[in-house]
Amino acid sequence: ERDAIQKKTFTKWVNKHLKKAGKQVRDLFEDLRDGHNLISLLEVLSGEHLPRERGRLRFHMLQNVQLTLDFLRYRKIKLVNIRCEDIVDGNPKLTLGLIWTIILHFQISDIMVGQEENLTAKEALLRWARLTTHKYPNVDVKNFTTSWRDGLAFVAIIHRNRPDLVDWRALRQRSPRERLETAFNVMEREYGVTRLLDPEGITKAARLGDQHVNYKALSTPSLKLPFQ
């Protein structure tokens, strides 16, 4: 179930960027196997043009995926136990691991600008969320799982930066699902943040202790809103 939630979230993120190249993936594990979508994704994210093999044989697929892995290593991105064969064979866990590594480098690491050097991107994001919401009653951001499931933290972040967009007092009386729906809809409408999750995904992630999903859901708004 955890892998299914991550797959859904990561697929939306990949498609958000692949759209700029006129491409789309339907099945994350299947549609990255030949390496072409991976190369296109990295081209969009890096702004660089990368070579690729045009053939359809397994050899060409391996070459394309290897090219993406080599490019990531060239960018000083650490890859742990991910081989080109794993992606070509559609290995679910390692494919998710590769996409998560790409997300960490190309998106979440952007929040590190101006932060203390000894902070990781994850720590900086959590600190930003805590500082942004600390004056709001019943909002106590301690982690990327249970702290977000009632929707109050998401609403507080929006209200702290744009109080005209949400009615904080009214939403405090609403259900967690209504708060989450409101927050996600506002971020998509006002900030152009692609909706990566639904309320059920947030609830499941909290129950399963899956930090990746809420971490990803929060990282995109953080790039649209100022650090406090």
Image: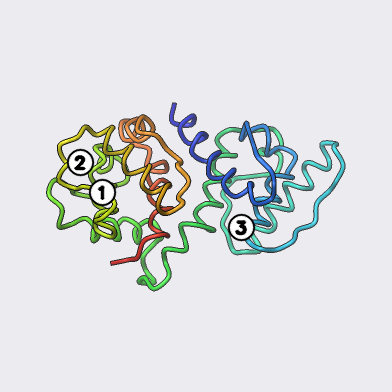
57, 203: nearer the viewer: 203
Q: Residue furthest top?
A: 1
Q: Earlier in the sequence, mark 2 or mark 3?
A: 3
Nearest to the eye among marks 3 and 1: give it: 1
Quarter of the image that includes the C terminus: bottom left
Q: Amino acid at mark 3?
A: Leu
The residue drawn where x is 35% and y is 71% is 116
Q: Amino acid at mark 1?
A: Val
Nearest to the eye among marks 2 and 3: give it: 2
Marks 1 and 2 in Cβ contact (< 8 Å) = yes
Q: Is residue 208 above or below residue 45?
A: above
On the picture, is 150 further left or further right than 23?
left
Q: Is residue 228 above or below residue 18?
A: below
Q: How many numbered tags mark residues here?
A: 3
Q: Amino acid at mark 2?
A: Leu
> How far is disc 1 from disc 2 in space, using C-alphas?
8 Å
Q: Which residue is mark 1?
A: 166
The residue drawn where x is 53% and y is 40% is 12
10, 87: nearer the viewer: 10
The residue drawn where x is 21% and y is 32% is 175
Residue 30 lies, in percent from the top left, at 67, 32
> How far is disc 2 from disc 3 in space, using C-alphas?
36 Å
Q: Which residue is mark 3?
A: 45
Marks 2 and 3 in Cβ contact (< 8 Å) = no
Q: Is residue 113 above or below residue 45?
A: below
Q: Which residue is mark 2?
A: 171
On the picture, is 34 further left or further right than 152?
right
Badge 1 element: loop
Q: Earlier in the sequence, mark 3 or mark 1?
A: 3
Residue 131 lies, in percent from the top left, at 23, 61
Residue 109 lies, in percent from the top left, at 47, 61
